[in-house]
Each structure stands twice: as C-alpha cells, then as structure tokens.
Image (cartoon, rainbow, N blue to C red):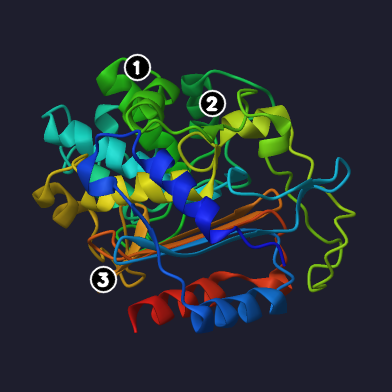
Amino acid sequence: MKKTILALLTILFGSFFSTTNVKADTVKADVVNTDSFEKQVDHLLDQKNFSGTVLVVRDGHVLYSTSQGYSDRQEKHKNHFNTSYEVDSIQKSMTAALLMKQIELGKLSLDDKLSKFYPSVPGSSKITIRQMLDMKSGLILPGDVGPQKVLSDQAIISSDIKRIKFSHALYNNWYYSPINFNLLSGILEKVTGQSYRHLFYESYIKKLDLKHTEFAYSHRLKSANKATGYTNLDPISGASSYSHPFNITRFETFDELGTGQMFMSAHDLYKVENYILAGDMLTKASRAELFVPASVSDYGGGFYNKYNDHYSDGWGYGFQGVVHLSSDGQNAVIVLSNYSRISDDLKPVAKEIFNMVND
C-alpha cells in the first residue's frame, strides 16, 4: 500500500493551507499518527480493492491520508496527493451555497417561485427555491439532464424544460431529481448576470487558491493529475482490472450544470466544504437555515444533515465520492474513488471511518 510519508505530508499541508486567508478553513500542519486507526482504515479499504484518495481530519488535524491505485492504468499514472476526481453530486452543496449567498445579498428569497425565472416549467407557480434546494419540488426529468450536444448553459436548461414533468403526488415530498440544481444554476446566472463557471471560479477556486479543481470540460488540469473513471462490465464484480475506463462524451461534461461537473482533489474538496459549513462564506444564520433536515431523507441544501454530520455523496462516470463533515468542520472524512462498483459501495466505509473519528 502506498501511504503518504507523514513528514512530507506535514510540509505539504502547511504550504497548501497557508495560501488562503479564510480563517475557519485552515487545517493545522500537525499530523496525528495513530497506528491503530491507520490499520483499521487500511483494512477497510483493502476489502474494497480501493482506488482513489482518502483524507481524514480530526480536531482540525490531518489524522490519515492515503492514495491508492491508478489514476490512468494505461499511462501507468498512480493516484497521489494532488489527483483530482470527478465529485459528481457532491457539487450540489457548492451550488446551494452560491445560491444562499445571493439570498444574503437580497437578490433572491427562499420563498421566490420558480415561475419568476422559468414560467414555462410545469408547476413553477407553486414551486419555491427552498423546495428545489431540498428536492421537494415535484419536478421529474425523464432520462439524463441536458441535450446530446454542447450548448450554452441557458440553452441546456431550455432543452431540459421541454422534457420536464411535474408530479402532484411528489410535490412537497422528497424525490431526488438533479434537474432542480440545473435550474438553480440557471437562476444564479439570471440574478447575477454571470456564468455559473465564473461564479464558481471567483467564489471557490480563486478565493481559496485551489490548485487541483476544475470543470470537467476544462483542460487546465494536467492529465497526470486528473483521474480516469473505471468500472466493471459485471456490476457486482469486485475485480480491479482497470480494463474498462468510462468514456465521457464532451456534451455530458456541460450538461451536468451545477450538479456534477467538477474535478477536485480530496484536499481541495475538504477546503471548500469546510469553508461552506464553518467558514465565512455564509453567515451563521444562513447556514442554520440552509443546512437542516428538510425532509424525511434529511436532505437540505446539497447535504444530508444529521446531528453533527453533514453528508454528501456522488456517483457516476466511473467515480464515487463520499464526504462527511462535522458542523464546525473540524472532523471530516473525504473519500474519492475513480473505480466505482456496486459491489464495493464506499458509503458504509466512509460512515464507519467518520464514526471512528468521532469516538
């Protein structure tokens, strides 16, 4: 198993997190070495034939970090400290925070109706911003989001609107539908006059000096640092042959507007989520309003919110990511994998590690 050398990790983290002035987002450079903890986590990952990066933070200290497997088997590139993975639906928490910021600025209200921005959407006169954030809008999009060609953001949304259905039975009841966050991204663009990409760049990449975060369609990340997603033809096979890389079409990387189009390293991802949950991006009142269990699923504002555990996960294109953070951001587990297999779902592993951190 390839484990990051602790002395080097200390230097890297000290340098990495000193580049931002965001006070609440700082991770201390001290590394806590707990052999028994490492052995337990190693065992859990070995059982899953893990390929990816894991970062564990406790009390603001890096407790554990490892990268395993190949980011590109054909090129013999291995996953490492700076490898970026597609985070898929984990991006929704970042979109939700961008939206909440506009509410703080008085440009939006959680009670605003969808019809104010997209009146042709079925049921839009009843659906609020809050319901969309909590997946309680009743909106359904048959098939995948977006058209099968590269279009502008608003053209993508216009194409989706033609296929959107509204369910009275699902209205005000939780139903996970990514189209909600496509539309919310479009609303962000309408109220700010800026593209989603620009808002994301200014609010996260530039603000936090992220070096290993970029949109899936961008060529900014070096191929050696950008993981390829893998899967198996047999969905229940736990093999790790790397023989089936997931091919992503260019239009898909645009279609996942605001819902799953970011590549991020584990360390960048922690930095952003900590900034959102415990930093100064949002006021304490805004966070309390946004990140609450808003339905039987506990989903609200891009996270599943339980007591002192804000959880998010993403799955697609050969990747799986899982995030758990405490409310103060001091305890966290970030698991990013570029080899997704139904038989080796990483959600239970991430949850078990987070429970260990909090024991």
**Count of marks, rendered view:** 3
Judge by depth and name the residue closer to the eye, 26 or 118. Answer: 26
- Residue at the (45%, 58%) spot, across then down: 176
Q: CA distance from mark 3 to mark 2?
A: 37 Å
Could you tell me if the residues under marks 1 and 3 are in contact, i.e. CB atoms within 8 Å?
no
> Crowding at label 1, few (<14), some or many (≥20) Cα neighbours within 10 Å?
few
Number of the label disc, if any, that sits on residue 272: none
Camera sees residue 142: yes
Q: Given the current orientation, which residue lies at the most extreme top position? A: 193
Q: Secondary structure at mark 3?
A: loop
- 30 with respect to 157 (left or right): left
Residue under numbered circle 3: 308
Judge by depth and name the residue closer to the eye, 296 or 18. Answer: 18
Judge by depth and name the residue closer to the eye, 37 or 141. Answer: 37
Indicate which disc, 3 or 2, sits on the residue closer to the N terminus.
2
Which of labels 1 and 2 is toward the front? 1
Residue under numbered circle 2: 156
Position above or below: 263 against 277: above
Can you tell which quarter of the image residue 314 is in? Answer: bottom right
- Residue at the (12%, 44%) spot, across then down: 283
The quadrant the C terminus occupies is bottom left
> Crowding at label 2, few (<14), some or many (≥20) Cα neighbours within 10 Å?
many
Camera sees residue 118: no
Residue under numbered circle 1: 194
> Crowding at label 3, few (<14), some or many (≥20) Cα neighbours within 10 Å?
some
Residue 264 on image: x %, y %: 53, 42
Residue 158 on image: x %, y %: 49, 25
Indicate which disc, 1 or 3, sits on the residue closer to the N terminus.
1
Q: Secondary structure at mark 1?
A: loop
